[in-house]
Every structure is written in C-alpha cells, then in structure tokens.
Amino acid sequence: MNFADVIAELKKRYRAELERVTVEWRLPTDAEEARLIAEVELRVPPAPRDERYLTDDDIERWTAEVEISVEALFDGIAMYLARGFHTGTLPFAFCDAIVNNLNGFVYDPRSFYATHAKNGPLQGPPKLFWDIYLAFDAGEYWRPGDDRDPITSYTRPAIGKIVEENVGFRYPDASL
C-alpha cells in the first residue's frame, strides 16, 4: 500500500461528498433553484455510516502499511485535500467531511492517533493539519450580518494561502 491508495480509499468512502461539487458552492437565488438543488442532492445516496466514516483501525493500518507517522498521514491527507480544493478538483463537502472526521481522532485519548503521536497523547494535531482543518471549518457556517458565502469568503483565501506557503510540501511517498 502507498499514500495514493489511502487517497483512493478516502474517495471511495466519501463518494457522496465527492459528487456534490455542483450544488455546494453557492446559495440558491430563488425557490425554483432551491428545489432543483434539493432534488439533485436526494439523488446522491449517502454511504452507510459503518462504511463511510474512518475508524481507528484505518488510521493504524495506513500508518503501518505506508510506513509513516500519524502526523505525516494527517498532514499528507490534509495537504492533498487543500491542493485539490484550491485547484477545483475536490469539492468543499468532501474535504470538510474528511478533515472533520480526522480531527475527531486527535482529541480522543483512546485513539491510535492520541497514543502514537510523537508529542504524546492529547497534544493536539500537527500544525499543517490544524491550519487546513480551521480553513475548512471557516466555510461551514454563515456569520451574523455577513451574507457572503463563507466558503468563498473564508475557506478559499485561507486554503490558497496555505497552498502557496507550502508549495514544496511532499507527500509521504512518491505515489502521488
């Protein structure tokens, strides 16, 4: 297994979010458009919960098979998502779902991440992963008094800056 295989598993597991690219990036402008968006969203069946979300076993298996640290795994996945979102090849919903799922392992004292992180349990995520997580988190909600799209106004500029600042980032292996 290599890092590209990890990404392929993520794309398979989060297929529903990957296919929502056309309806995620703007608010409907009228009732008819809202109805059409809802209709399209209903056509994309969500994956069953037990197959969709990452497990501790996934994290442990990937680090062992790719032979990388949990920090390198999290940073690599996050940077792949950031670059894909920045270039328009990965939708917000896909990227946001994965970083949210990964972040749940960081603060669970029983998780493989927490027990195998170099800094020890509950020391927080690696900085690059955290910065990318926060950038996607910023696009999840509207702000009072601000009618701008939060993905366009907050996530895109933050991700753009991260990608530019980390242009030399290399994935854990040469498979991507």
Image: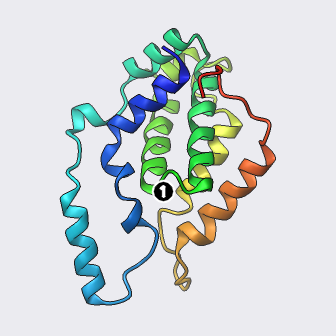
Residue at horizontal 28 percent and vertical 73 percent from the top: 37
| Model colouring | rainbow
Label 1 crowd (10 A; few <14 / some 14-19 / many >=20): many
Q: Residue 118, how many percent across, how many down? A: 67, 17
Q: Residue 134, how many percent across, how many down? A: 60, 52
- The C terminus sits in image quarter: top right
Image-based side of 60 in relation to 72, left or right: left
Residue at horizontal 58 percent and vertical 21 percent from the top: 70
Residue at horizontal 56 percent and vertical 15 percent from the top: 116
Image-based side of 54 in relation to 31, left or right: right
Q: Is residue 162 above or below residue 33?
A: above
Q: Which residue is mark 1?
A: 92
The amino acid pointed to by label 1 is Phe
Q: Residue 158, how many percent across, how many down? A: 68, 59
Q: Nearer the viewer, residue 139 or 166?
A: 166
Image-based side of 170 in relation to 91, left or right: right
Q: Residue furthest bottom?
A: 30
Q: Is residue 141 above or below residue 65?
A: below
Q: Is residue 103 above or below residue 143?
A: above
Is residue 124 visible in the rendered structure shown here?
no
> Element under label 1?
helix
Q: Is residue 32 above or below residue 49?
A: below
Residue at horizontal 23 percent and vertical 55 percent from the top: 44
Is residue 140 visible in the rendered structure shown here?
yes
Q: Residue 79, how many percent across, how many down? A: 63, 40
Q: What is the quadrant of residue 159 in the picture?
A: bottom right
Report the label total: 1
Image-based side of 165 in relation to 76, left or right: right
